[in-house]
Amino acid sequence: MRYRWHNATCLLYPADLPDIVAPPLPWLWHTSRRAADVTIQSNFDLKKRALFLKKSWPSCVLLLMPSIHFNLFRPFSKYLRPYRKHIVFGTLFLLGTQAIATVIPLLLKWGIDTAEEGLESGDSLDRVGDDLVTYALLLVGLAVLQWGLSVGMRWYMMSMSRLVERDIRATYVRHLIKLPLSFFQQKQIGDLLARATSDLESIQRFFSHVFRMSLTAGLMFIMSLIMMCTFDWQLALLSLAPMPVMAVTARFVATRVRTGYRRVQEQFATIIARIQENLSGIRVVKTFALRLSEIEHFARLNEEYIDRNLRLVHIRSLFYPFTALLNGISMVIILWLGGLRVIEGTLTLGAFVAFNAYLIRMSRPMMLVGRLVDEYQRGVASITRINAILAEEPEPEEESHDLPAFRGEIEFRHLNFAYNEEPVLHDINIHIPAGSTLAIVGRVGSGKTTLARLLPRLNQADEGQILIDGISLDQIPHRSIRNAIGYVPQDTFLFSDTIRENIILGFKPATDADVAQAAEVSQLTPDLAVLRDGLETVVGERGVTLSGGQKQRAALARAVIRSPRILILDDAMASVDTRTDEEILKRLRNVMAERTTILIAHRISTVKDADHIVVLDEGRITEQGTHEKLITLNGIYADMYQRQHLADELEEL
């Protein structure tokens, strides 16, 4: 049976078959079992694959063979398919340019031979000159036609490379946005940015240069070789002598270039990530006087990047001149042998000139081998890094179906959750009636935020159920549930835009009155009066021009303006003072009265009026009830209340 694994094709053979000679396939497995599917994770190295196979089929024989791919463009084929027209027309124009380039040495031969024959037969110089002028005009005409075809070829090929670049970038970004939150918790943003910039640039360079040069070199080589064979097939075959050496060398170099370039790109991603972190955390860098240490750290990263590039430079420095040396030696030998044949009279002077013109044309593709190998391996390494992200499993796209408007009844049933197999929530059971307010309190790291993230499906529960209006959360499409929830997270993020746009944030039905009402509820209106441009104030990257409290209130206004059925406030007022907190809660009561609210806070004054309060400790519900009931229990909640009450009294003194 055939089984496709990455870019390799595998054959599984039963052991009772007679011994066979291994065909030229990347992998050949000899096994005692009949047809069976093989599952191998893509990150297994060769040794692990062998161990896996031996464990699965103890009697199997594993024959390893080098990977042979005749279609060099296979890693890029799916991106080229939409632009077949560009490739076809570009190739036709290319054929035209190469056909003309192939005819030009023939014209030289005919012109030289005509002039030589005319002089030998005693023709006048004027007649010989007229013949040469005719050939010269033909050469000029062909050169102009070649220029026109070359313009068309370049337009189609270059435009195709830009269109493919656009498609890959759009696919990459679209896929990134669809990935679950857990993916971004494990990846550096700088690495993802490097793939979208540096790697994509290498891919574009491959399509604009390597793709075109490969076709050009192939046609140039074949046409020149055919024409050389028409003059002297022995000399033509002799000119191919460097090819085996160059093929072996190119194979040897290709692996090292791809590995080296992948390491260069990985280091570049590390540098980008460090720059991004330093710029995002510039306040921390300056506050803790980390300027010199960060400069030194970056210098080390930069030095490692240069070292990895220099290793590639070392390979290129040896390989490029080596190909030129082989071609130079070959041309010297051909010139010597061809010259002898002209002297002997077995080859005309015109044929010898044309042969050498074709030899020079054929030597160009051979000299380009080094650059083509280098650029190709860069492109393959980059597309591999892009495809590694595209292979990540996105959030499932459920079929959209009509659901009744949510009432807001929420229930957590025997809910468990773990981060990287580290338990965070244990057997959570909570029922929240529609239109009621649930408050969640607890010490730092008790699992409050994790519980809040499960409701909009930013994280996925390992065990148990979450029900909304009696419907399992797994049966509700992401879009439907997220449209029904207004979520204000702990870590407030504002886009580099105006305050108005940050409040609206894609909510198209919002009017100016809605924006003003949301700003009033979140107590942002007094701050807008102080800001010179009010709602039109540009907040800068991540809202850097606003205070922490202003950013939290803008995020709160963003949630309120949507009038969601479920409102989740995850420590949304931690950055405002107690007085502002009370004012916000006062205005929020009318909003909260009409919808289900989950209120997470450290201040007891924020949660004491909630319909039901849950106390989390180490991922477990340890206490629950109303404010008055929890005070009488003298547990964690009562201890938090007494500490905060004492702190408030000390502040008043």
Image (cartoon, rainbow, N blue to C red):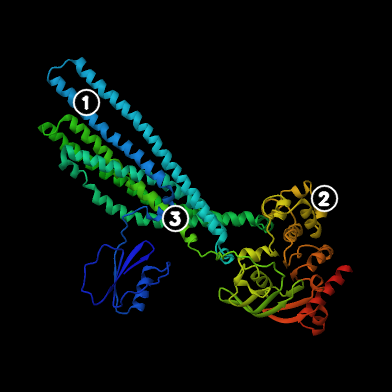
Q: Is residue 114 left or right of residue 386?
A: left
Q: Secondary structure at mark 3?
A: helix
Residue pictured at 11% horizontal, 34% vertical: 346
Residue closest to the far right:
653
Pointer 3 residue: 383
Examine the rendered structure and indicate whether residue 330 appears above or below residue 282: above
Q: CA distance from mark 1 to mark 2?
A: 87 Å
At 41% across and 69% down in the image, what residue appears?
44
Q: Are the residues tagged 3 and 1 within 8 Å (C-beta)?
A: no
Displayed quadrant of residue 132: top left
Q: Which mark is residue 332?
A: none
- Tell me the kind of residue under disc 3: Ile
Q: Quadrant of the C terminus?
A: bottom right
Disc 2 is placed on an element classified as helix
User: Percent from the top left, x then y, of residue 23?
Assistant: 25, 64
Dot 2: few (<14), some (14–19), or many (≥20) neighbours within 10 Å? few
Q: Are marks 3 and 2 in contact (CB under 8 Å)?
A: no
Q: Position of residue 642 (x, y in %)?
A: 82, 77
Which image quarter holds the N terminus?
bottom left
| Separation of residues labelled 3 and 1 (CA atoms) | 49 Å
Q: Report the residue marked by disc 2.
A: 529
Q: Which residue is mark 1?
A: 111
Q: Is residue 46 visible?
A: yes
